[in-house]
Image (cartoon, rainbow, N blue to C red):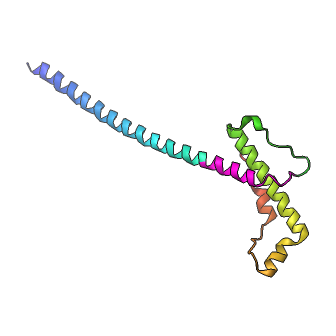
């Protein structure tokens, strides 16, 4: 009689341990799913923001020697990275043109707008992710 009861209690103990592990893993899975959904929303908003920025910069020309972003991969992550790089090139060219024209100094002197000074070395140090 005693050996049968020992086997049963041992089996129940193992069952309870496994159920506890299952609940813990289900909780971890649920938390991970929520984090993934949040990251997906953030990524979607970032992509939309980059495309919006690109739309605002359509009137600016790319620097010489730079080609347009390939439009066939509009949903791929590479497209967004290339689009962001293109926006950066356009903004850098705009900044150079404004510096050449002396617009930054004029705006700062007149006090119409506060234009932050940009250190070229800091901008050049920023690396594009691979």
- Report x, y in % for residue 56: 75, 55
Establish if 22 lies above or below 49: above
Quarter in which the N terminus is drawn: top left
Going by the picture, which residue comes out furthest to the bottom? 110
Q: Residue at x 17, y 27 (%)?
A: 9
Whole-percent x, y for residue 88 in the image: 77, 54
Measured from the top left, where is residue 129 in percent x and y?
71, 46
Q: Nearer the viewer, residue 78 or 5?
A: 78
Query: Image check: 72 left or right of 19?
Result: right
Compared across the picture, whether 8 is left or right of 108 comes to left
**Residue 58 lies in the magenta stretch:** yes
Q: Main secondary structure of the magenta part?
A: helix
Chain part drawn in magenta: 45-62
Q: Is residue 37 magenta?
A: no
Q: Nearer the viewer, residue 20 or 76?
A: 76
Viewport quadrant of the C terminus: top right
On screen, residue 49 versus residue 117, left or right, reads left
**Looking at the rendering, which quadrant does residue 118 occupy?**
bottom right
What residue is drawn where x is 76% and y is 80%?
111
């Amino acid at each position: 009689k005693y050996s049968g009861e020992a086997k049963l209690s041992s089996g129940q103990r193992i069952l309870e341990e496994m159920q506890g592990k299952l609940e813990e893993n289900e909780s971890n899975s649920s938390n991970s799913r929520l984090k993934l959904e949040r990251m997906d929303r953030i990524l979607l908003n970032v992509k939309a923001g980059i495309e919006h920025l690109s739309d605002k910069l359509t009137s600016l020309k790319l620097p010489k020697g730079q080609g347009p972003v390939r439009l066939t991969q509009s949903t791929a992550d590479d497209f967004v990275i290339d689009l962001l790089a293109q926006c950066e090139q356009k903004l850098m060219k705009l900044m150079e043109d404004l510096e050449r024209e002396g617009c930054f100094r004029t705006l700062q002197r007149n006090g119409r707008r506060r234009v932050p000074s940009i250190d070229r070395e800091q901008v050049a140090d920023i690396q594009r992710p691979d």
